Amino acid sequence: MPIPLSRCPHLLAAGLLGLAILLLPACQGEAPVSGGAALPDGQAAAAELPARTPLEESDFQALTPHDQVVSFLEALDRGSPRVTLRDMGTSVAGRRLPYLEVSLGTFGEPREDRLILFIYAQQHGNEPSGKEGALALALELARGDHDGLLGEVDVILVPQVNPDGGEVHRRTNDNGVDLNRSHLALDGPEVVALRELFHRWEPEVAVDVHEYYPWSGAWLSEGWLRLWDVQIGLPTNLNTHPGIRALAEEEGLTRIVGALEDRGFTGHNYVVGSPELLRWSTTNPNDGRQSLALLHTLSFIFEGKRSEPLAADMQRRSEAQRVAQETLLRFTAERATEIRRVVHGAREEARRGEIGRVVLTMGRERGDGPLEIPVESVTRRDGREASASGPPEDAWVVGDTVTAVVENWFPAVVERTSTSLPAAYLVPASEAGILELLRGHHVELEVVGRDVELGVETLTIAGFRQEILEGEQDIARVTSRSGRHRTGDGDVLVRTDQLRGVLAAVLLEPGSMHGALTQPAFRHLAAEGPYPVLRVPTLDGVALAGIP
Ligand SMILES: [Zn+2]
């Protein structure tokens, strides 16, 4: 069924450009959209959309500065009924943090019938191509190019999480905080704003858009330059629900790599490290992707190929990033039923307290054989032996594509230690900082009245052992003892049968490689002796009369 002409969004937009007749077949070819696709009469009078992104206006020569990001999004908001411009907060330096809500109807409504895709780019200010790709996708969404994908999916698009870093091409925010190492610590206002936006909607699918740096010395010294346009990182933290991990790996990754290749780009599962030690990605939930995966989200990271200088080859780089983001939207739309089943199922399991264990430490294991990947061969222009001296690029000559064989290949993320997930943790009122951190993560807390008697496991840090996990790390050796405990005034119960129960356990367990005690603010917890947080194995038969 063709969409009636009066309701064809392409026609409304195209009519302004006098191209109606050319674009009409596109509308007829797209499946009718459901869920309030119709644009009310009169919307055609909206302001004209920009024809191009700021990057395109510069003929791909100039990266889009923050003021142009804002004015471009404002123009999309004025020119399209599909997008609404909002701010999620302000940066350290006071810059606006704009984002778009994209919907054919009322954004996020009705929530139970919608999937929400959460795209956020440029947490690292010196990685611009994701932002440029997001702006290109935003224009297409505003114009109606992807209306056929928005029948069941709404999109939140945050093109620039770190504008202060972006303005000066710096990784960190204006306080020197690496925002993609701030998702557990919540020590960057930009990340707090981003996560508040996430908590407001709890999107089912998310992607954090970055760039990787192919010109690293360890690869150059082998004569190799990594060539993928976009690497796709998966939720590899073992506390991610297995159904979500399988969907990401078996379907999402394949689809995105395939779509990139169909358009003349290259993609690959994200490999991290150097030929001396190479592995799949990392597991740290201080980054955006893993942290949202712990909240039972189908969560990815895209790593576009960075360049030196930063704006070089931006047409290809931004287009590859746009294609990857568009493909994730397409995947979300086309697999909506399965994604809903897996993500909502995982969230229900969490709320019912059916997640039995939490992995405390994860390591890596060697694969069966070496990794063989395509790379570009590089030699030094001055004929000297290749060394680890790195860029500038003009010191190097890029040659043929060859196969790199990496022997030190550790593809498996493996569990080292885990513990059963207790029914709850008891945090004493004296640990106000921990409680504030949990509140910052929207973990549900219940204040227990005084003198409630609970069966508990008291925990003691007996010492520390050094382990090689993602790097060398000191991990607490923990002993536990069962006993009875009477609560004090203001003590707080953190039940694990909630959406953020696994996240709470990752933060509260003293033997957790990503526990709060590894954060600078909570070093006082990383001391030998009694640990102040108690495990409560079961709440059966406990009279919690004091809970309001
Ligand atoms: Zn990055």
Image: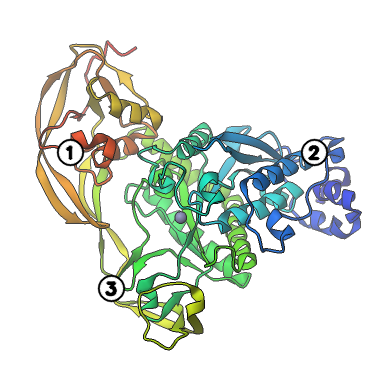
Going by the image, does 379 lie left or right of 112?
left
Local crowd size for mark 1, using a 10 Å CA cut-off: few (<14), some (14–19), many (≥20): many
- Gap between marks 2 and 3 measured at Cα: 56 Å
Residue 87 vs residue 3: left or right? left
Q: Which mark is residue 39?
A: 2
Q: Earlier in the sequence, mark 2 or mark 3?
A: 2
Measured as percent of width and height from the top left, residue 285 is found at 36, 46
Q: Amino acid at mark 2?
A: Leu
Which residue is pictured at 27% across the width and 39% down the height?
A: 520
The percent position of residue 459, horizontal first and vertical second, equals: 13, 33
Front: mark 3 or 1: 1
Nearest to the eye among marks 2 and 1: give it. Answer: 1
Q: Which residue is mark 1?
A: 526
296 and 195: which is toward the camera: 195
Pointer 3 local density, CA inside 10 Å: few below 14, some 14–19, many at least 20: some
Q: Earlier in the sequence, mark 3 or mark 1?
A: 3
The quadrant holding residue 105 is: top right
Comparing labels 2 and 3, the label whose residue is closer to the camera:
3
Q: Position of residue 399 (x, y in %)?
A: 50, 85
Which mark identifies residue 408?
3
Q: Quadrant of residue 133?
A: bottom right
Please state which of residues 399 and 548 is positioned toward the viewer in this rendering.
399
Gap in angstroms between the C-alphas marked 3 and 1: 33 Å
Q: Quick one: SS at disc 3?
A: loop
Q: Is residue 389 above or below residue 173?
A: below
Q: Residue, x 45% and y 82% (percent of image)?
A: 378
- From the viewer's perspective, is 300 left or right of 284? right
| Secondary element at tag 2 | loop
Where does the image place residue 313, in percent across and percent down from the top left? 60, 69
Residue contact at pointers 3 and 1, CB within 8 angstroms: no
